[in-house]
Amino acid sequence: MKGRSGFVRWAAENCKGRRLRPGLAENIVYSMRHLIFHIPLILLLSGAAAAAQPYERFRVSDAESERLTSETYRHCMDTSGGVTANMRDCSYAESQRLDLLLNATYRAALGRLPTMARRLELRQLQRRWLATRYRVCEREAREEGGGTLGLLMLDGCALSEDARRIIWLERFGRRR
């Protein structure tokens, strides 16, 4: 039994003759070590979940959101002639621009954070947001019955959601 940990050695010696699956003691030790190793991460993530709630309640004014809307987008929408395809092209170009700004703002927020724990917290929050960011928009578009108005609502909502997240990231790390 050379090379086995104390618990594994104890279990192997004291459980002889009992019906234990082969390797059960090793599995128990592995599970305990795995759990102990991940307890700090579990605590961090549970804290991250609690910290995610302020974003759910985070609102921005129209003026704050307008600050992030480009002149190019406004001009594109004004000259679209009300044609859905043209308006969606405008929204697509603006979403690409906002996505670049979102990534830059996220990197800047990470750089502002003093500890690795806070950076991990933000990374988890951002991943969770990325996975769910347009669900509200999709629901609102469905409630409109779909169609071209639903598509335009989806695009506008997605742009607003991206702007809201950028503003939240600008403030993250400064509010605690």
Image: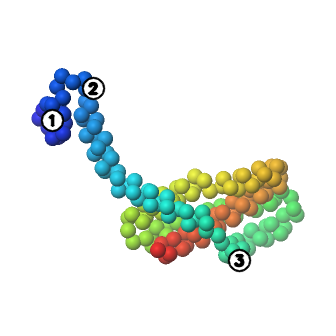
Determine whether the residue tagged by mark 3 lies in a helix, strand or loop: helix
Q: Residue at x 39, y 72 (%)?
A: 114
Residue 114, visible in the rendered structure = yes
Of the image marks 2 and 3, the number of the one nearer the N terminus = 2
Q: Can you identify the residue that label 3 sits on?
A: 63
Front one among 153 and 145? 145
List x then y, in percent, for residue 123: 47, 60
Determine whether the residue tagged by mark 1 lies in a helix, strand or loop: helix
Q: Can you identify the residue that label 2 sits on?
A: 21
Determine whether the residue tagged by mark 2 lies in a helix, strand or loop: loop
Q: Residue at x 53, y 62 (%)?
A: 52
Q: Can you identify the residue that label 1 sits on?
A: 9
List x then y, in percent, for residue 153: 77, 58
Q: Is residue 41 left or right of residue 88?
A: left
The answer to which quarter of the image holds residue 56 is bottom right
Indicate how the structure is coloured in the image: rainbow
Of the image marks 2 and 1, the number of the one nearer the N terminus = 1
* Nearest-to-viewer mark from 3 and 1: 1
Q: For the residue marked with disc 2, what is the amino acid?
A: Arg
In the rendered view, would you say 23 is above or below 38? above
List x then y, in percent, for residue 65: 68, 72
Q: Is residue 126 left or right of residue 27?
A: right
Q: Is residue 1 left or right of residue 83?
A: left
Q: Are marks 2 and 3 in contact (CB under 8 Å)?
A: no
In the rendered view, would you say 142 is above or below 51? above
In the rendered view, would you say 116 is above or below 22? below
Disc tally is 3
- Give the CA separation, mark 3 to mark 1: 68 Å
* Nearest-to-viewer mark from 2 and 3: 2
Q: Residues within 10 Å of mark 2 (few under 14, many from 20)?
A: few
Of the image marks 3 and 1, the number of the one nearer the N terminus = 1
